Image: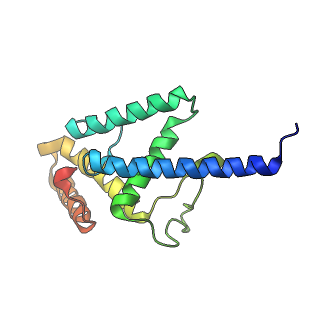
Amino acid sequence: MSHDIQSLRVEVATSTRAAYGAMRAYAEALCSTLPAGWYGVEARDTGADADKVHAEKKALYAELKKVQHSNPSTIWARVRNYGAEFVEGAKGEGEGEGADGEGEGEGGSGAREARSLRVRLIEELITLHKACKREGNALEGDLRTAHTFVCSALAELKVDISKV
């Protein structure tokens, strides 16, 4: 092969930068078109708001399959993280690099992409809140109390649970 390694290296860096920018711009646009907290919607979530998010995810997957992307779920996960960062703020320096083994990583290297602790808390608390909401009046005693604490934690993180 007579390819110039330097020019190929530059092409890889340029295309990566373009993809990163495109995913961030897409995530920011979704923040103004999809329901609040769209980035916290899980595959099993239902309802009108969740249906809008699922429809957008399906449309993105279709576009990625047209260009034979090998793992559309990786792109969707990154877009969700960028949306959460846009709404909740970027992670602080050093966050995500703790003793628990979660550090920064690129999806291509096999490492998990880092999420800020704020985003992780919000996403996981929203998941718990939705699970409790599905149970409705069946929640009793300590489970009802735990749900109250989950709601309080979300309120502390400035999440409007009426929009979740």
Left or right: residue 38 compared with residue 23: left
Residue in the picture at 52% in, 28% down: 65
Q: How is the image coloured?
A: rainbow
Asked whether residue 55 is in view, the answer is yes
Left or right: residue 105 compared with residue 1: left
Left or right: residue 70 compared with residue 56: right
Residue 125, image quadrant: bottom left
Residue in the picture at 51% in, 58% down: 114
Looking at the rendered structure, the number of numbered marks drawn on it comes to: 0
Where residue 6 sits: x, y (%)?
80, 52
Where residue 100 sits: x, y (%)?
53, 64
Asked whether residue 40 is in view, the answer is no
Where residue 134 sits: x, y (%)?
20, 41
User: Which one is in front, 120 or 14?
Assistant: 14
User: Which one is in front, 154 or 30?
Assistant: 30
> Which quarter of the image is occupied by the N terminus?
top right
58 w.r.t. 76: above or below: above
Residue in the picture at 77% in, 49% down: 7
Residue 159, image quadrant: bottom left
Residue sitting farthest toward the bottom: 93
